[in-house]
Image (cartoon, rainbow, N blue to C red):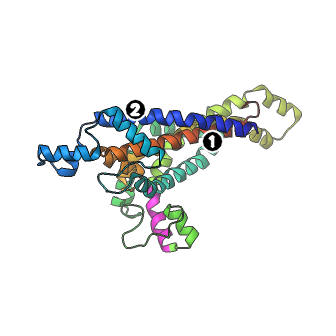
Amino acid sequence: MRVVLYIARRLLFVVPQAIGISVVTFVLVRVLPGDPALVLLGTNATESSIQAVEERLGLDKPLYEQYWLYIKDVAQGDLGTSLITGNPVREDLLDRLPATLELILLGLLLSLLIGIPLGVITALSGSKGWPDRLTSPYGLFAGSIPDFWVGLILILIFYRYLDWVPAPLGQIQIGVSPPDKITGMYVVDSVLTGNWEAFKSSGSRLILPLATLVFVYTAPIVKMTRSSMDEVLNSGFVDHFEALGLSRRSIVLKALKNALPPVVTILGVLFGYLLGGAVLVEIVFSWGGAGQYAVQAIANADFAAIQGFVLIAAVFSLLTYLVVDLLYFALDPRIKY
């Protein structure tokens, strides 16, 4: 019951936080250079035609009135209409979000599967072991280079020179039919529908984007796991377990459980960041996800698309942090609701 009440209280805070984010976004997008009317009409548009379009879009109204009309539409599930695609922003995001989620969820999953064991091994081997000599330079290097640069280097090596992977042009090869839509994630839907041709095509195009994300974002997971494990292994309760004669394996597993909360935190932070921060990786690989959609919207002063993306990303991030808190409680019973 306490868990339900806690979740309810946290969800109540999501609404005012989302409203605050929407206000800031609404004001900022109107400060950006660019006029939606000029985007629609072109640079040769007359003053009267620009004014007519601004009236049609409601841009001639005071800012507070524009925001009130916008928030009323959002409350009804209407995020507006994209100037570029002509589609409702909600439909555009629903079409593109699965591609982004597929990329970042698989990327974080692989980073987790590699980073946690590597961090544990590094902590167990100590500062003079070979794992530390391997992970320390890697962490510094991966933390100092942008992810899109890694993507470009991987394309240059594995596509341009070695020709081991297909061209970085979208999620699936031209001429191959996408799988029937269930989740919107091509690899997942290919498996669920048994479309192995689509699975082979979409899976091969995931290799380099995933390698890019895994290379860059495994580093903070390794660092946090190693740091947290070091702290736990040097604590008194580990000495107590050793005095009781517990096996090394049992002690390491118990230490890992106590070291996981900070790792869960960094994982939640990475997910929230990648939802909006992987846009350059999407552009490098022409991924067609929500991040690439947002960049195109900014370039074309597409107010509704920008606002819709930021609002959805913010809500996703807030819900992610709620899940992180719940995992904290599950991993550490000392924490009270």
Q: Nearer the N terminus, badge 1 or badge 2?
A: 2
Height in image: 333 above or below 274? above
* Front position among marks 1 and 2: 2
Q: Identify which residue, 288 or 112, lies in the foreground.
A: 288
Q: Determine if the magenta segment contains residue 202.
A: yes
Q: Residue at x 39, y 64 (%)?
A: 166
Q: Determine if the magenta segment contains residue 163.
A: no
Q: Residue at x 42, y 65 (%)?
A: 172
The amino acid type of the residue labelled 2 equals Val
Height in image: 296 above or below 259? below
Q: Quadrant of residue 3?
A: top right
For mark 2, what is the residue? 24
Q: Residue at x 75, y 42 (%)?
A: 253
Q: Position of residue 299 (x, y in %)?
A: 28, 45
Give the extent of the magenta segment: 197-208
Does the image show residue 153?
no
Q: Identify which residue, 165 or 6, lies in the foreground.
A: 6
| Majority secondary structure of magenta residues | helix
Quick one: label 1, few (<14), some, or many (20+) residues within 10 Å? some
The numbered dot on residue 323 is 1
Judged left or right of residue 103, residue 248 is right
Q: Position of residue 47 (x, y in %)?
A: 12, 43
Kind of element beneath mark 2:
helix
